[in-house]
Every structure is written in C-alpha cells, then in structure tokens.
Image (cartoon, helix red, strand yellow):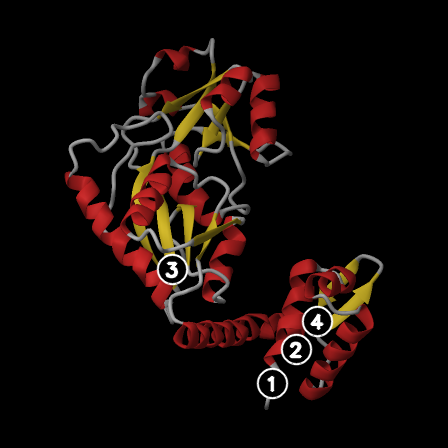
Amino acid sequence: MDFQLRFLNYFLTIVEERSFSRAAIKLKISQPSLSQRIQTLEAQLGFPLLTRSVRGVTLTSEAQTLLEPFRDLVGRGSRIERLATDFREGETRPIQLGVTMYSGHPERAALLKDFLAAHPATRIHIETIYTVDLYPALVNARYDLGFSVGPPPPHPLDYINLCHLRTELLVPGDSPLARHDEIPISELAGLHIASIRSQRFPALFDMALHPLEEAGAILTYPTDQTPMGLVTYGRTHHAVIAMAIPFMADPELAAAGLLRRPIAGLDPPVALMLVRPREAATHIGMKLWDFARSWTKEAIQAENWPSPRSAGETRPGDPR
C-alpha cells in the first residue's frame, strides 16, 4: 500500500492537537482541505480513523492500533529528509536542540559554552519542550539532540549523563526535618509526603519516589499535580513534598516557607542528560555529541568541577 507520508503527518497532527481546527492552523492549511486528506487516507485504508463529537476527536480502535506504526513511518521519512538535506547542503544549518523545562542546570550551560568556544562557526537553535514531547521529536528528526532530566530514556534513544540529581524533600522551615543537612532515611518511616501520582510519570515514580514508600513513607497525592500545585499544597497544609527533579529555585521555595533537603542513603535516581536518536543520528548533531563525550570524561578529572549543589549531587557519568 503506497502511503502518503504527508497525509499520515496530517492524521498525527490531529491526534496531537485533538482538534481538526487546531491541526489545520498548525499545518497552515484550510480545515476543509485537511478533512479531505483524512477522508482520502481512510478510503485508502478501508475503514475510519477518527470520530468527531461535541467533545472533540477520538480514535477508532483501528487507529489506536495503527498509531505507533504511523509514527514510526513518519519518523523514518523525516529522518531521511533531514539526512538528505544535510548531505546536499553540508554543515551550514544550526544544530537543532530541544531542551526540557527543568534541564537548565549549570552543566548544560557549561557544555554549550565550551562547545561554542571550540567551534565558533557553529550555530545552535534551542527550543523548550515538554519531556513527553521531546523523545518523539528526536525520533522524528525535529531535533538533532536534546537535553532532558529524568530516568534513562526509552530504547530508540542514546544518552550521556552530565550530572546526577538526588531526590529531595521540600520541608517547612520550622519542621524538625529542616535541622538536617541530609534527612536520615530512618526519618521517612510513617512520614506523610505529598507526591505526584505514578500514572503521571511512571518511570520517574518507580525510580525516585517508590523508594520513599519502601523506606516507610506514606505518599499522598494532591489534586493539583503541577509543581506549583504541590508547592501551594505544602504551604497551605504545612506538608512535606517529594521533589524527584528540581523544579523551583531556592528563592521561590523560600517565599513559600519551604527548604530543600536531600535524603541520605538513596542513590541519585535521575540525571541531566544529552539525548540523541539511536537511528540516523545527524552529522551536525554528532559534532556536539562527540564533544560532550570527551567533555564529560575531562570533567571527571577536572579539579575545578563544581562540588555538590543543593539542587542535586554533581556526578558526571560515563557516556552510555
């Protein structure tokens, strides 16, 4: 069956936007034209993909089964197009970097500063993106590389650890726990800790927050699961909050009457990572990737590598 990758991309954009009208705006085509393209795709397949209702757009059972193969097919087409462009035009375009919201650690800035000093003619274009969107965007060749904070990414991606980050608790300033520079793990038994739900970030929960339960903590789940929602809950309920990744600066936490405290005896479960697609990595992206591999090894040996910060332990890792 001869698929039009453009039509598959239209379908995936509708799925992403959950709306024909929003997808049409994003794709810069008219809504009737978009509807016609989807009808052509459905006629080619022999069954419907989308159902419209007053609540929006939903996938048929057939579309749910085909969603990941469609994404894979469009991603492979995008990677071929990106590689072909690079072969034709050489290394003249900027390196396209996707960075997640909580990846702005000093190590990221230091790596990019050193890289640009070593390659002054190279340009870098940076876009901020959510982690859940970054990994598919890398696979689909929207970015050459990405910076992310969290547990190891899924299989189609390679990563280099730039530093590891410890799980911390946000505690009220007048709490007995605030007296500790590091909270003994024995203090967790019976302690109520506000947390994100496992369904929100399953891998992050398993690596960073489930060990708190194993140590005897009782996790509670505020209704507002955003970082600010957790902080507001901690301030209004005088509660302890689990912080699996650093999401607020110390002055903001201080304004809410909270202090960050690491937990003694727990291995750092997450890291600041440079991430790339395993298949069809771009030549332009490889320049920064190879530099980062060398940079992390040198950083381990450097006498002036920063000491552990309150935001997490600085521990450069070997390339994976």
Q: Measuring 33% from the left and 48% from the top, which residue is drawn there?
A: 116
Q: Which mark is residue 276?
A: 3
Does 148 sit above or below residue 141?
A: above
- Are discs 1 and 2 less than 8 Å apart at CB? yes
Q: Position of residue 231 (x, y in %)?
A: 56, 25
Q: Is residue 79 above or below residue 107?
A: below
Alpha carbon of mark 2 to alpha carbon of mark 4: how far? 17 Å
Give the Cα distance between marks 3 and 1: 27 Å
Q: Is residue 193 visible?
A: yes
Q: Which residue is mark 2?
A: 7
Does label 3 or label 1 sit earlier along the sequence? 1
Tell which residue pokes out farthest to the front in this image. Answer: 121
Camera-nearest residue between 7 and 177:
7
Residue type, mark 2 in image: Phe
Q: CA distance from mark 4 to mark 3?
A: 32 Å
Give the mark nearer the N terminus: 2 vs 3: 2
**Marking on residue 123:** none
Where residue 122 appears, x then y in whole percent? 37, 55
Q: Are marks 4 and 1 in contact (CB under 8 Å)?
A: no
- Amino acid type at image mark 3: Arg
Query: Which part of the image, by quadrant, shows the C terminus?
Result: bottom left
Q: Position of residue 285 (x, y in %)?
A: 36, 61
Q: What residue is at 44 percent from the left and 63 percent from the top?
A: 93
Q: Is residue 152 in view from this perspective?
A: no
What SS does tag 1 mark? loop
Q: Quadrant of residue 178?
A: top left
Q: Residues within 10 Å of mark 3 (few under 14, many from 20)?
A: many
Task: Determine which of the numbered discs, if any, sits on residue 60 in the image.
Answer: 4
Q: Reading the chain from its start, which is encountered first: label 2 or label 4?
A: 2
Find residue 262 and report its image quarter: top left
Residue lying at 46% horizontally and 65% vertically, measured from the top left: 139
Q: Where is mark 1, residue-wise? A: 3
